[in-house]
Amino acid sequence: MGGIVAAVLLALGFFDLLYHRPRELEFATVLFGAPLPVLATLGMVRATHRMRGWAQWLLAFVTALAFLFVGLLTGATFASRLFPI
């Protein structure tokens, strides 16, 4: 399920970048900004499967929010220089 969500977010991000001219973002931003929070949250949910529901979902939300910003900032700064697409 996490792979499907990451693939859908990647596709939406790429279509959004292709739709707008001139592009303000690089493709590397989408490459890091979409799948990183999904995969980090999936790992957090699997790692905390023995916890109570509310604590597990709170940790998953905090992880997703933190990695959303980390992924977008990494993609916009560091990765866009490595992958100039």
Image (cartoon, helix red, strand yellow):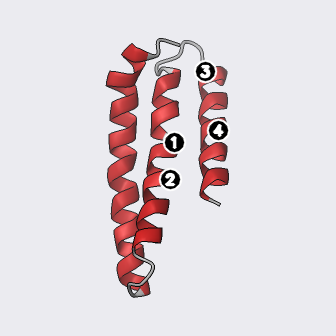
Image height check: is 44 above or below 21? below
Q: Please, what is the three-letter code of the amino acid marked with disc 3?
A: His
Helix, strand or loop for disc 2: helix
The residue that disc 3 covers is 20
The residue that disc 1 covers is 34
Q: Please, what is the three-letter code of the amino acid marked with disc 1?
A: Ala
Which circle, 3 or 4, is nearer the viewer?
A: 4
Image height check: is 1 above or below 69? below
Name the image quarter holding the N terminus. bottom right
Q: Please, what is the three-letter code of the amino acid marked with disc 4?
A: Leu
Which circle, 2 or 3, is nearer the viewer?
A: 2
The picture places residue 50, in percent across and down from the top left corner, at 42, 84
Q: Give the mark nearest the N terminus, 1 or 4.
A: 4
Q: Are marks 1 and 4 in contact (CB under 8 Å)?
A: yes
Q: Residue at x 34, y 70 (%)?
A: 59
Q: Give the mark nearest the N terminus, 3 or 4.
A: 4
The residue that disc 4 covers is 12
Asked if residue 22 lies left or right of residue 53, the reply is right
The alpha-carbon separation of the residues under discs 2 and 3 comes to 25 Å
Helix, strand or loop for disc 4: helix
Q: Are marks 2 and 1 in contact (CB under 8 Å)?
A: yes
In this rendered view, identify the residue nearer to me: 19 or 36: 36
Q: Are marks 2 and 3 in contact (CB under 8 Å)?
A: no
The residue that disc 2 covers is 38
In this rendered view, identify the residue nearer to me: 43 or 38: 43
Q: Residues within 10 Å of mark 2 (few under 14, many from 20)?
A: many
